[in-house]
Image (cartoon, rainbow, N blue to C red):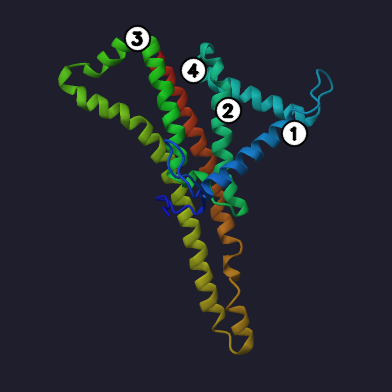
Amino acid sequence: MNVDISGAKIFYTFPFDFPILGKLSISETMVVSWIVIAVITGLCIWLTRDLKVENISKRQALAEMIVDTANHFVIGNMGEKFSYMIPFVSALFATSVVSNLISLIGLRSPTADLSTEAAWAVIVFILITYQKIKAGGVGGYLKGFTQPIPLLTPFNILSELATPISMACRHFGNILSGLVIDTLIYGALAVASSALLGLIPGIVGNVLSKIPILSVGVPAITGVYFDWFSGCMQAFIFCMLTTMYIANAAEG
């Protein structure tokens, strides 16, 4: 049984090989990703229920504000001709934010697994390549690797491949590091709590030393940055880079 580099648990491995795909396993990342999809789908259904033209509810006002923000973000960064990208960028942002913040309820963030960001980055890379070929044709796309001089062709190819790798690793590194730091802080405070309260003599010290009292509160404060701020910021940065790369590729 194989475990990915970020330590996600394997819940189930199918006992037979699938054609082409080989053996498939259901990992913790996949299960939580399905939960994320269910949460986002449920929110979308709830927000768009009983829509009205007049006398709209607060729920509909929130839905309209979200749609308006998404429209301004994509069109403002990519131009009106890329309005068809609004659903994709919105879905990417929502998935990233919910995946990052789901750790607040004790589930392991799918974005703490490099395979999640790698899949997103591959999709973005395909869109970038498509826009470049659409703008200059296959010949123009291939010729671009030889600019400004043919000698730089290997470096231009590496630079092209570095785009999805850097996007995936940046997002993954920040989320995983926050998860690790939060865990270390919680563990350190639990040890400190046991050591300090264990100094109390008698049965009271024995009982209190087994309760991680110092772990209550402080991890929540650090989580404001590592979970809320960093999670939302990394989702924003990933989507910003996506829009910029695709828009620049379309310019040739």
Dot 3 or dot 2, earlier in sequence: 2
Question: Which residue is drawn at the image coordinates 52% and 67% (left, top)?
Answer: 189
Measure how far apart labels 3 and 4 are at the Cα level: 21 Å
Mark 1 or 4, which is nearer the eye?
1
Amino acid residing under circle 2: Ser
Bin the neighbour count of mark 3 within 10 Å (Cα to Cα): few under 14, some 14-19, many 20 and up. Answer: some
> What residue occupies the far left of the structure in this picture?
151
Q: Name the residue under label 4.
A: 78
Relative height, residue 235 to residue 153 (above, below): below
Residue found 40% across the figure and 34% down from its top: 167
Amino acid on which disc 3 is placed: Gly
Residue indicated by mark 1? 46
Q: What element carries label 1?
A: helix
The N terminus, quarter of image: bottom left
Examine the rendering and report whether any part of residue 94 can be seen: yes
Q: Nearer the viewer, residue 239 or 91?
A: 91
In this view, the mark in front (3 or 4): 3
Label 2 packing within 10 angstroms: few (<14), some (14-19), many (20+) = some
* Residue at 44 percent of width and 45 percent of height: 23
Nearer to me, 1 or 181: 1
Q: Do the residues labelled 3 and 2 touch (CB within 8 Å)?
A: no
Q: Which residue is the site of mark 3?
A: 137
Q: Mark 2 points at which residue?
A: 90
Residue drawn at 60 percent across, 55 percent down:
106
Q: Residues within 10 Å of mark 4 (few under 14, many from 20)?
A: many
Q: How far apart are marks 1 and 3 (CA)?
A: 44 Å
Q: Nearer the viewer, mark 3 or mark 2?
A: 3
Mark 1 or mark 3: name the one nearer the start of the chain. Answer: 1
Callout 1: 10 Å neighbours few (<14), some, many (20+)? few
Q: Closer to the N terminus: mark 2 or mark 4?
A: 4
Q: Is mark 2 on a helix, strand or loop?
A: helix
Marks 1/2: CA–CA distance:
17 Å
